[in-house]
């Protein structure tokens, strides 16, 4: 697991404040770094099947996590790809944003 994935898991769990993601699991793939699973238990490093998979490069993921770019804007700009359940992707965007 990369340092970025480890830091992201910690940051996502803090953002969710003990709340999980209803309707998951969801996966966030960070190119060349690894993947994060997000479900009703919270965030953890992992690469398992998911209802929705979001993929971005490390720079875009950091910007989303830090609030510098909105996940929807990243998607519209082609910096974030979504494969699967768009409704769940929107729920995840609310958690990330």
Image (cartoon, rainbow, N blue to C red):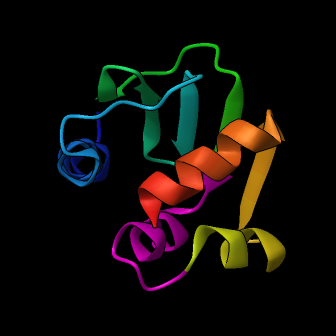
Q: Residue furthest bottom?
A: 68
Residue 53 belongs to the span the image colors magenta: no
x and y percentages locating residue 83 in the rendered image: 81, 38
Q: Could you tell me which quadrant the N terminus lies in?
A: top left
Q: Nearer the viewer, residue 41 or 11?
A: 41
Up-down: is 5 above or below 35? below
Q: Nearer the viewer, residue 6 or 24?
A: 24
Q: Residue at point 56% right, 32% down?
A: 27
x and y percentages locating residue 95 in the rendered image: 44, 53
Q: Residue at point 64% right, 20% down?
A: 50
Up-down: is 48 above or below 64? above
Q: Quadrant of residue 24?
A: top right
x and y percentages locating residue 14 in the rendered image: 17, 50
x and y percentages locating residue 39 in the rendered image: 44, 23
- State left or right for residue 29 relative to residue 35: right
- State left or right for residue 61 relative to residue 57: left
Tell me if I can see residue 35 in this picture: yes
Tell me if I can see residue 31 in this picture: no
Q: Quadrant of residue 67?
A: bottom left
Query: What range of the chain is rendered magenta?
Result: 55-69
Q: Nearer the viewer, residue 6 or 13?
A: 13
Residue 63 belongs to the span the image colors magenta: yes
């Amino acid at each position: 697991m990369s340092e970025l994935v480890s830091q992201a898991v910690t940051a996502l769990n803090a953002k969710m404040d003990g709340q999980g993601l209803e309707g998951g699991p969801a996966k966030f793939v960070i190119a060349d770094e690894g993947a994060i699973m997000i479900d009703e238990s919270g965030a953890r490093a992992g690469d398992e099947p998911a209802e929705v998979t979001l993929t971005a490069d490390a720079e875009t993921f950091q910007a989303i996590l830090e609030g510098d770019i909105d996940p929807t804007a990243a998607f519209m700009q082609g910096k974030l790809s979504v494969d699967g359940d768009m409704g769940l992707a929107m729920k995840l965007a609310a958690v990330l944003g």
